[in-house]
Image: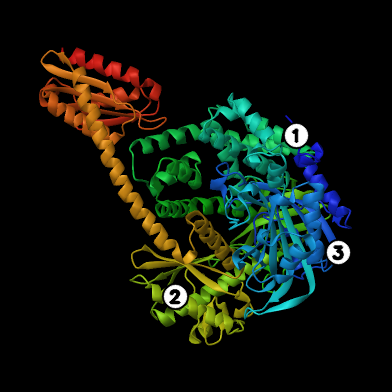
Amino acid sequence: MSTSKPGLKKSVTTGAGIRQAFLKFYESKQHKILPSASLVPEDPTVLLTIAGMLPFKPIFLGQRKSPVDRATTSQKCIRTNDIENVGRTARHHTFFEMLGNFSFGDYFKEQAVAWAWELSTDVFKLAPKNLVVSVFREDDDAYAIWRDQVGVPEKRIIRMDEEDNFWTSGPTGPCGPCSEIYYDFHPELGDDDIDLEDDTRFIEFYNLVFMQYNRDADGNLTPLDAQNIDTGMGLERMAQILQQKPNNYETDLIFPIIQTAADIAKVDYFKQDDAAKVSLKVIGDHVRSVVHMISDGITASNVGRGYILRRLIRRVVRHGRLLGIEGAFINDVAESAIALCESAYPDLRERETVIKTELEREEAQFLKTLERGEKLLAEILQRKPKQISGDEAFELYDTFGFPLELTQEVAEENGITVDVNGFEAAMAAQRERSKSAHETIDLMAQGSLAQLGIDSTDFLGYTDATSQATVKAILANGETVDTAEAGTDVQLVLDKTPFYAESGGQIGDRGYLSGDALVVRIEDVQKDNGLFIHIGRVERGTLTVGDSVSAQIDRACRRRAQANHSATHLLQAALKKLVDDGISQAGSLVSFDRLRFDFNCPRALTADEVQQVEAQVNTWIAEAHSAHIEVMAIDAAKAKGAVAMFGEKYGDEVRVIDFPGVSMELCGGTHVGNTAEIGVFKIIAEAGIAAGVRRIEAVAGPAVLEYLNVRDQIVKDLGDRFKAKPEELVDRITNLQTELKTTQKTVDGLKAELALLKSDQLLDQAATVGDFQVLVANMGEVDADSLKTAAERLLQKLGDGAVVLGSIPAEGKVSLVAAFSKPVMEKGLKAGKFIGGIAKITGGGGGGRPNFAQAGGRDATKLPEALDVAKSQLEEALG
């Protein structure tokens, strides 16, 4: 059956047709069609390209001049902040395409609004009666354009607040109001009291951002000299609208991938229950994500964007298992995704071998441990705990490769939680245990370097971000080599370097080495006996000992590390000033995205003290204290009152970092030149980690905005879900918890009453076996607690005898219970051992006391067989 709307060519309703129509329309309006940027962004503040405008952010911020006045793109994007909603809602995805048109100081509101309407109604043939627009509450200009020039009825122009319709690039900088176009699936409901948050009726498909102001530190708005336009139209959402589908997943952009997965699982998507459909949708969405991520050069790992890739792949594999798919299958689904997208993204087919090799390797690695991990997790869940412990979650992660998020996901499906704090503690302990082994390996490698007579590395990084250097040695797979080809993981030594090596709590720099046709990505730098070991991968060309290379650090990462390191110094000074002058450091971590400071203190800080410490640090930042950095004799430094950092080794001469009147410490790390460069400081946690040792975790600089954005989104999501303002959320959730507890008590009571009524009806089924009454029965869907109550009541009414009951409380779950009287036990029967053996028939286990025991299983189809065996064994033992 055709999905075309009257008057709209079928080709324009397809995903490819929509993409092409959008780009061609704006090309006709003198926009330059630009290709999609990589999913690996230039912006160091984000891991992945999360929005269509991200590649143009430096232009909008005035950091770079645009080569064109107008541009249009179809930008591939990845977002994982709503990953738990993927497949469960109509339009949440990890991978999506954002169609956009952009003006860099050229046209503004009138043209942007007129063209958006023309595109929607003339090209995509959307009926005006199905369209509603929103504007910022104070944007009278946009309101007037929509009403007077476009002709939208006033009732279908909705004014909205800043949180919905005002775009900002941060606390300061370019910003402006937004206007959005929504599709109304039910215009027959009328124009009165339109609620755009009703996502059963409305879907936002086009967002127009009018970048017209600059916001200063005091919040004042002044008009920009060059006003910009940034828009975004969700390709998947427009496909849902034009193809008249109930959700984005059933459009031609995704459904062919889902169909491939369904064929492999030998199921009909449209006949599946909600859980199976979710699994198929997750596979369809995630496979789109991973093929594009690998194509753009991302490889699976345990950190950063590599971790996101690994997590998505493992979710695909697990949801395949939930559908009954055994063995490897992801590459068959990936082929469907590549074939579907290659016309728009030909690099997918060009890098097909790379994509499939990476997917095959990751899938095989996960499958090796998944079955054992699933078995352990099932055993944990069988005990019906209220929470999976931190040690159990860590064992699943460390031994079986289960990411914490996967354990949390399975736990949530079973209505329980995971002790995340306990998991983190176990993870920290594992790091400490592995530290010595890691150092032994490194020392062996460095020892082989030392045998080559290599001198110590000359560190230039305090003053230089780039330098020319000579490659003195290369290690691959722990062995010294003369050359390393592209794709090889290496450790190498240079005669001089701008890269900071991990020490004093600060992690090593990242960056690149380059030469003629050579690129080496440096991910970490370690130091031992004066040698700087650069750890990375040869990305292009051939690396050879003796090569002259250009070494360049990632300046953005360095600035973030400097901000966090200097903030750590200010934090210690604030703690000494406001909490206890005797506080001393017990450890620290300075990374690109956060800082951690451990200190000796016999008590927890109060909430007021934490707030005061944070405020004091931010006051020093705002006061713009310049750093005075000096190298001097250690005795002179101590005489001046410089504080030594924990765990640092000092020579006769030391480096003193002095923010006069605030902090003075001995430190070999990199720092800001002025506290104002830190920007802002935020404490995110304060806790005890050992007797008399506390830990503060914090973020500084750009990481604060990222932290606040995540939490702001969480608050918004909670507000949307609970239909409450942020200030009302606590009361709203408290009331819901109270209502839930009351309701649960009522339900539990009714379940217990029902179980007792059912149990009374079973008395007639009791059989006389020798001197005993034996009752073995299936109680249907009764829960485990009610099954226990029923067994105890039946045994009490039967007198001397044995009761074995089974039930299926939920899909894929079996509950069993055995209750024996004292004379039965005297016959040698023990309830715990007996029911444990019966439970094995259903793929489970259990046990308990000699007179009473419970067990469970996973295969509900085996329950009748298990009960028959129980009855036969009781008759044989008691007859």
Please name the residue that numbered disc 1 is placed on: 339
Please name the residue that numbered disc 2 is placed on: 611
* Mark 2 burial class by Cα count in 10 Å: few <14, some 14-19, many 20+: few
Q: What element carries label 2?
A: helix
Please name the residue that numbered disc 3 is placed on: 69
Classify the position of the N terminus by image quarter: top right
Mark positioned earlier in the residue sequence (3 or 1):
3
Name the residue at 22% across, 27% down: 759
Give the left or right position of residue 312, taking residue 174 as reference. Answer: left
Q: Which amino acid does label 3 sit on?
A: Asp
Q: Distance between the residues labelled 3 and 2?
A: 47 Å
Q: Position of residue 516 (x, y in %)?
A: 84, 55
Q: Position of residue 53 (x, y in %)?
A: 73, 59
* Mark 1 burial class by Cα count in 10 Å: few <14, some 14-19, many 20+: some
Name the residue at 78% across, 60% down: 150
Q: Position of residue 199 (x, y in %)?
A: 59, 50
Q: How far apart are marks 1 and 2 (CA)?
A: 55 Å
Label at residue 433: none
Q: What element carries label 1?
A: helix
Mark positioned earlier in the residue sequence (3 or 2):
3
Give the left or right position of residue 607, taking residue 520 as reference. Answer: left
Using the image, determine if residue 769 lies above or below residue 276: above
Mark positioned earlier in the residue sequence (1 or 2):
1
* Mark 3 burial class by Cα count in 10 Å: few <14, some 14-19, many 20+: some
Camera-side residue: 527 or 13?
13
Q: Are marks 3 and 1 in contact (CB under 8 Å)?
A: no
Q: Which amino acid does label 1 sit on?
A: Ala
Q: Are marks 3 and 2 in contact (CB under 8 Å)?
A: no
